[in-house]
Amino acid sequence: MAHAITVGSEEHKELFCRVFTETHLAYDPEQVDWPELDEATLARLRALPFWNEAVSTEHDVARKVQALAPLEPDRVLREAIALQGFEEGRHAKLIRALTSHYRLPADPPDEPPLPADIEWAFIRTGYGECFDSFFAFGLIQMAKDSGFFPEPLVKLFEPIVQEEARHILFFVNWIAYRRAQQTLPRRPLDWSRCAMAMALQVWARIQTARGAATDDFMLKGHESISMDVSPRGFLRLCLRENDRRLSPYDPRLLRPRFVPTIARTALGVLGLPAKLTGKSDG
């Protein structure tokens, strides 16, 4: 059994950065062998309402992460953040290649000026990825189990989904390490900034959900998926997939807690038992 580590120590930093870099998967999005899809599958893909947002979001995230790396004075952290920036940029390239190859409705991404406070932008982006990845874990498994997307396409995007698990794992450990390195008087300010970042992401997701409620795909698209897509079933699936996606990594590292806790609380309100498992980010 591995010895315990102190969160915020140099050993903690070395561990979460090493786990991140050693689990990097090499692949080239420009060398993807796109599978042939039948017209019914292409119609389903083209009916999805989020391709524009997916292209824009991945591009925006990549720019913010890549901008933070050169500002980080610690070499070990700088290299890990730079690697994440590379992976985020690769995600953006793969999504653009997908939409181009299958002629999916997506416009070229905008490039507004980067925020003045890059670290704040990275923190907000990190909490946003914690939200989005949790639900993406469930959605990708649902798409696989239901046959809504063909297996070759699901398999093609499997590395992206698993990379997002690595990204949120790195992020919550980075937050904890960074906070531990601050002086005691500065820690309450850091807590408040993180709480504000989480609150802003909660509000953004609420606004997105309100907009999606009027979208015909969101209202009727579930009819194409031959499995239980009730809120309770979906939350349970997301929790199970979240645990599975994060399970390969060193158990001494912190796990994202905020979104899984919300999901478990919702399950409790809905009358379903939800066992709390795994170490959290506190």
Image (tube, rainbow, N blue to C red):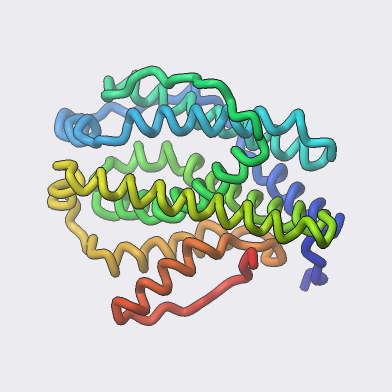
Residue in view at x 57 percent, y 60 percent: 256
Count of numbered marks: 0
| Screen quadrant of the N terminus | bottom right
Q: Which residue is drawn at 46% across and 27% down?
A: 94
Give coordinates of residue 49: x percent, y percent: 25, 35
The image shows residue 139 at horizontal and vertical percentages of 34, 51
Left or right of residue 44, residue 3 in this image:
right
- Residue at 47% in and 65% down: 260
Decide if residue 220 is on the left or right side of residue 2.
left
Looking at the image, residue 237 lies above or below residue 134: below
Residue 206, percent across and down? Answer: 35, 52
Image quarter in which the C terminus is found:
bottom right
From the viewer's perspective, is 235 left or right of 46?
right
- The answer to whether 269 is drawn above or below residue 51 in the figure is below
Residue pictured at 41% horizontal, 74% vertical: 265
Residue 277: x, y in percent? Answer: 54, 75
- Quarter of image, res 101: top left
- Between 198 and 20, the one lying in front of the other is 198
State whether residue 275 is above or below residue 167.
below
Closer-to-camera residue (1/116)? 116
